[in-house]
Image (cartoon, rainbow, N blue to C red):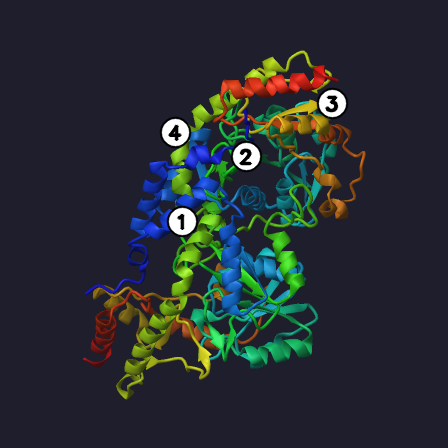
Amino acid sequence: MKVPYSYLREQFADPQPILDALKEQLSRCEFTFGKELKEFEDRMAGYAGAKYCLGTSSGTVALSMLLKAAGVRPGDEVITVSQTFIATIGSIVAVGARPHYVDVLDDYTIDPSRIEEAVNSRTKAIMPVWYSGAPPRMEEIMEIAARRGLSVIEDSCCAIGGRIGKKHAGTFGAGGAFSVHPLKNLNVWGDGGFIVTDSKEIHDRVLLLRNHGLRTRDEVDVYGYNARLDTIQAIVGNYLFPSVDEITEKRIANAAAYDRAFSASAFQPFITLPPRRPHTRHVYHMYMFLAQQRDKLLARLIERGIEAKVHYPIPNHLQKASLDQRPPFGRGDLSRTEAQCQRLLTLPVHQHLSREQVEYTIGEVRKFYLE
Amino acid sequence: MRVPYVDLAAQFKGNPDYRRAIHEILDSGQFVLGPAVAEFEGNFARLCGVARAVSVANGTDAIFLALKLRGVGPGDEVITVPNTFLATVGAIVSCGAFPRLVDVREDYNLDPALVRRAVNRKTKAIIPVHLTGNPAPMDEIMKIADEHGLAVVEDAAQAVDAALSGKKTGGLGHLGAFSLHPLKNLNTCGDGGVITTDDGGWADKLSRMRNHGLKDRNESEAFAYNFRLDSIKAAVANLQIPGIAGVTEARNRNARLYDEGLQGLAPRVVIPPRDPRVRHAFHTYVVQAERRDDLIAHLAAAHVETKIHYPIPVHLMEAARPYGYRRGDFPVAEAQAAKIVSLPVHQHLSEEQIGFVIETVRGFYSAL
């Protein structure tokens, strides 16, 4: 049996409704800033319960623009984690600021108790990451930020539909960035992203920044970027939007099946599941755990047709891109991050997996450890 | 008779090739990078007569990445012109560098004598803009750059398929930056851009810089950006490549008709000088017109759509205030901004439509 990691062929097996919508757009040829972009933004703002949403060309540039809009300038420090995709750090470096790495909890999200010791006179913002779709300790982080006068920009690129209580990812701080990359829970036909915010000021700045800083066709207030979400991508996003909760619930159900199986006492010496927080909605962009003999298990699963992955073997602070920095980026003790990277494994969890595929995957993990 | 400034529907509507290209991407599930992107890059490099092309998310990113590649950063200066789309200057500012603007000549392109005067010890790069699809005086610029060890990034956003002395734009400087925006001569179904270069090592590095700095799936050697061209957009742009020579010819033919038809209206209508060494690839057809705004209104009343590229020179925009420029700093560009008008020149116009525009312009001035 094959258990593929990507599901895009299944998802877009019948693209006709999207192609029809694209065709309708072609008669208008509004490839940038078509009405569908506004529709997409209104939908996502409503879904996240935020006042404003703006489509962007990627999640990475969404983060950079939020940092800029929040007043982060070259030389400023942004407290974040090393346990994340490199784009989190790239977005900070791109605005001339410097990441200050702090360690994570057992659920791979930022450890709030490490934030205060990282604050110094250059610190301007905190960037918690909803890694794999898991909720960071946003309540504690917001309390620290308020006390120390820092902005909070959420990297919620993996977390469309993620919630703490009833509050959606990306709505806790000054703004949140999302990705709609093809492998994200809500996806489009290429790169894309959006920001949400309740602040009119942040909205107004990002609105300028994403379109060259243009106030009108001919006048510019501040130099910005070309970071627009194409109309055709907004059309795809709009089409998939009604299924976002169904997609998420299927992923959550697959994750729950894995959790139930792997929390059996027989697995305890081999598999460490991250703690799950009650009253939150982890959206399982990735299903990850710590595995003994990770690389051997990975090889076995792949051999058995199961596309497991490692996200990611090298944490950011050990990437050449960080090691080359002079002076070095600020950092606390990152031993937990380093230990996790030796053992983290990701199993396919997407919405197109059948019950049989999930059971087969569990069975192969069981065979590896227990037989 | 209607003469629209752009006619994208004529290109895209009901065209089965686009549908097929999009279906191929859907069937492959490869939405990011992959064979469609590689194929487009190979074809674009051949089109420009360079060794390599690296696709990016848009033309602004193309300029920005090219500057970054050559080490442009805070404290550096980059020389360019004030009569460009502001994204040229925006890309310089995004690098943290200072935009050192110099005035232009009668053909709207930068003046090499002024470039020479603007070079100082902080200067790191020159961005000649091939405005309207007309190559800038690259011989002189490359000479200055060689003397001072400066990087030259062509802003060829408006100048795909143009050439100077037989050499294509994008291969005239060290690096070329192109845009695939829907309104460009070679376009795609959204934002897009390309960087060209003859240096394979640079192209490899640019390919990493547009993809988070990733060397492979897991390792990054320098933090960078997500500036990828979507595979779908690469596939759509790839479809335009076989037809671009025809597009250029059609636009150039329209421009020639204007050049001939508007002759003799000087000084009321001033056609810029045409350099015989240049193969222009008219992205815009820009003349300087007396009573410009009245002419535009007169043309609009006759259903002829015109534009102004661009009414406000970049140095007079609010965003440029920190750089200390003032009105009067660039007299040629400022005088042009008050008089320039862009007449429709796209490839879907008929000879009759061009003739009608010429007649309407002539009618306006003969009635004065």
Q: Looking at the image, can residue A172 be seen?
A: yes
**A295 or A99, which is in the foreground?**
A99
Q: Where in the figure is residue A301, as x and y percent of width and height?
A: 25, 68
Q: Which residue is mark 1?
A: A21
User: In the rendered structure, which amino acid carries the disc numbered 2?
Assistant: His
Residue that label 4 marks: B242
Chain ID, mark 2: B
Q: Are marks 1 and 4 on the same chain?
A: no
- Measure how far apart labels 2 and 1 are at the Cα level: 42 Å
Relative side of A23 to B327, left or right: left
**How far apart, in angstroms, are the residues tagged by discs 3 and 2?**
39 Å
> Mark 1 against mark 4, which lies toward the viewer?
1
Which of the two discs, 3 and 4, sits closer to the camera? 3
Q: Earlier in the sequence, mark 3 or mark 4?
A: 4
Crowd tier of the residue under label 4, counting other residues whose Cα lies within 10 Å: few below 14, some 14–19, many 20 or above:
few
B120 lies left or right of B256: right
Discs 3/1, front: 1
**Chain of the residue under label 1:** A
Do residues under tags 2 and 1 come within 8 Å of each other at their CB atoms? Answer: no
Label 1: how many Cα within 10 Å (few below 14, some 14–19, many 20+): some
Q: How many marks?
A: 4
Q: Who comes first in sequence, dot 2 or dot 4?
A: 2
Q: Secondary structure at mark 1?
A: helix
Q: Chain of mark 3?
A: B
Disc 4 is placed on an element classified as helix
Kindly identify which residue carries mark 3.
B290
Mark 1 belongs to which amino acid? Ala
Mark 2 = which residue? B174
Which corner quadrant holds the N terminus of chain B?
A: top right
Q: Nearer the viewer, mark 3 or mark 2?
A: 3
Q: Residue at x 29, y 49 (%)?
A: B27
Which quadrant of the view contains residue B216?
bottom left
